[in-house]
């Protein structure tokens, strides 16, 4: 949700206990003893004691502090004071019988349970986070270290503390939202239901995973093809709404006062109040590369109603997040509107068996146009095409031709981009 102050690659500090890293950390010398295969409180504390001095003297540790604004002599003074403090704390605990709480206070037991693979990164993280906690003590005064330098470390600790992620988004926590979770298979009407709520709202935003999806919703709202709830189907032209488009690649501003916005999920404005927010493909909250954007949107958007659309697999995670935010959660489950069945036999490579209304999925632009030519030669049917790099207008036009029974385009040849952003 936020970029950590410490850069994980250059400073050898993982972004989270779940982060796995390749190679070796330079923060601790290779001669440092590693943690035992099955660590216990006493063995871990002794390893910390052995690692403390090499970690303190490491150029990387000093560089990490100077990158936060401390002068080099301040960093060394702070580390010397911290070393004395840690030795006292660990030595005192060694005199007592080991308890799990001692491990948990350093966060090491949690790192091991999360499957962290680099012993030196575990030790580095434990010592670093305890240093930030040490520097955050109220009324701490260290001769030779400026108060503003200590305050910088306090801010670093606050930035790295993600134990309560919902509280990061204070604007959204100012009101209790009503969250609708629409889950079901493709072509079950879940997203359409959510979009009708958006079309009914005085102000709102749609956030999706793809530029193509955002463009489609933008286009449909502006031309009035998404009817508000309880609207007359024969009066669609009366329900056109001004909607702006905002993606990472383009902006289309219909009006500076447009009440609706369609955007990719990374571009959602978390400092604006909406009547309705629709977040599509919510199962992507678990994606290793982009999931943080869905997490930020779910926790951070300030709206009267939030509609989340996606797969059933997302339900447990959304339930857990809503317990953190205190928002009301309503789960709506959907079934496919039309049957979907796998053919008992394949075409056997005979393209003449393709029929009107069929869609062929392949996985490259070259294959798409090759199959288009083969099908048209074998059947006499005309083929529309769709793939990810097509301009949104062209893609929408091709989909419209295929959906229109009188257009003369009877078959669709497309890439797997039709999985998101193409209604057939």
Image: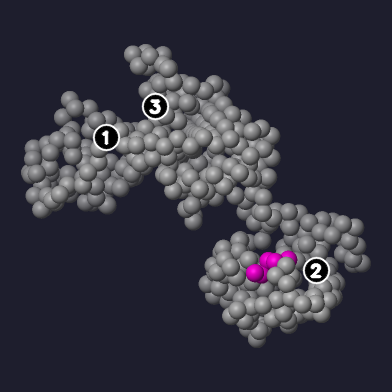
Q: CA distance from mark 2 to mark 1?
A: 66 Å
Residue at 10% across, 53% down: 348
Q: Is residue 277 magenta?
A: no
Nearer the camera: disc 3 or disc 1: 1
**SS of the residue under disc 2:** helix
Residue 338, numbered label: 1
Magenta span of residues: 104-109
SS under mark 1: loop
Mark closest to the chain's N terminus, 3 or 1: 3
- Tell me which numbered mark, 2 or 3, is placed earlier along the sequence: 2
Q: Secondary structure at mark 3?
A: helix
| Nearer mark to the viewer, of 2 and 3 | 3
Residue 304 position within the rendered picture, expressed as x and y whole percent measured from the top left: 59, 29
Which residue in the protein does label 2 denote? 75
Q: Dot 2, crowdedness within 10 Å: few (<14), some or many (≥20)?
A: many
Left or right of 216, for residue 144: right
Q: Is residue 228 above or below residue 164?
A: above
Magenta-highlighted stretch: main secondary structure? helix
Q: Which residue is mark 3?
A: 220
Q: Nearer the viewer, mark 2 or mark 1?
A: 1
Left-right relation of 24 to 362: right
Where does residue 104 sit, x and y in percent of width and height? 70, 66
Q: Residues within 10 Å of mark 3 (few under 14, many from 20)?
A: some
Q: Quadrant of residue 23?
A: bottom right
Find the distance from the CA under tag 3 to the CA under tag 1. 22 Å
- Most extreme residue toward the bottom, as rendered? 31
Q: Choose top left, top right, bottom left or bottom right for residue 412.
A: top left
């Amino acid at each position: 949700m936020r970029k950590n102050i410490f850069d994980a690659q250059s400073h050898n500090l993982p972004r989270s206990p779940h982060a796995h890293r390749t190679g070796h950390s330079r923060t601790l010398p290779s001669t440092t003893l590693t943690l035992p295969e099955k660590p216990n409180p006493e063995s871990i504390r002794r390893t910390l004691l052995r690692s403390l001095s090499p970690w303190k003297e490491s150029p990387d540790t000093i560089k990490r502090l100077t990158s936060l604004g401390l002068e080099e002599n301040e960093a060394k003074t702070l580390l010397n004071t911290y070393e004395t403090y840690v030795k006292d704390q660990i030595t005192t605990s060694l005199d007592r019988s080991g308890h799990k709480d001692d491990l948990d206070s350093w966060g090491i037991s949690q790192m091991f349970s999360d499957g962290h693979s680099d012993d030196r990164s575990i030790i580095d993280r434990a010592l670093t986070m305890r240093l930030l906690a040490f520097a955050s003590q109220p009324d701490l005064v260290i001769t030779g270290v400026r108060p503003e330098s200590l305050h910088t470390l306090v801010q670093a600790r606050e930035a790295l503390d993600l134990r309560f992620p919902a509280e990061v988004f204070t604007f959204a926590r100012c009101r209790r939202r009503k969250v609708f979770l629409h889950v079901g298979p493709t072509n079950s009407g879940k997203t359409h239901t959510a979009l009708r709520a958006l079309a009914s709202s005085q102000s709102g935003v749609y956030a999706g995973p793809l530029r193509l999806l955002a463009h489609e919703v933008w286009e449909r709202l502006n031309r009035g093809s998404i009817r508000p709830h309880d609207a007359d189907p024969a009066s669609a032209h009366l329900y056109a709404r001004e909607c702006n488009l905002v993606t990472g690649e383009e902006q289309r501003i219909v009006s500076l006062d447009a009440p609706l916005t369609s955007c990719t999920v990374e571009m959602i404005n978390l400092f604006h109040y909406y009547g309705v927010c629709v977040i599509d493909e919510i199962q992507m909250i678990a994606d290793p590369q982009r999931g943080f954007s869905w997490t930020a949107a779910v926790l951070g958007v300030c709206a009267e109603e939030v509609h989340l659309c996606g797969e059933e697999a997302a339900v447990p995670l959304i339930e857990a997040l809503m317990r953190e935010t205190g928002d009301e959660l309503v789960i709506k489950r959907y079934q496919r509107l039309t049957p979907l069945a796998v053919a008992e036999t394949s075409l056997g490579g005979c393209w003449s068996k393709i029929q009107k209304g069929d869609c062929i999925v392949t996985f490259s632009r070259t294959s798409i146009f090759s199959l288009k030519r083969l099908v048209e030669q074998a059947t006499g049917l005309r083929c529309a095409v769709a793939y990810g790099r097509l301009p949104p207008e062209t893609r929408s036009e091709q989909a419209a031709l295929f959906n229109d029974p009188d257009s003369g385009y009877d078959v669709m040849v497309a890439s797997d981009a039709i999985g998101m952003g193409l209604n057939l």
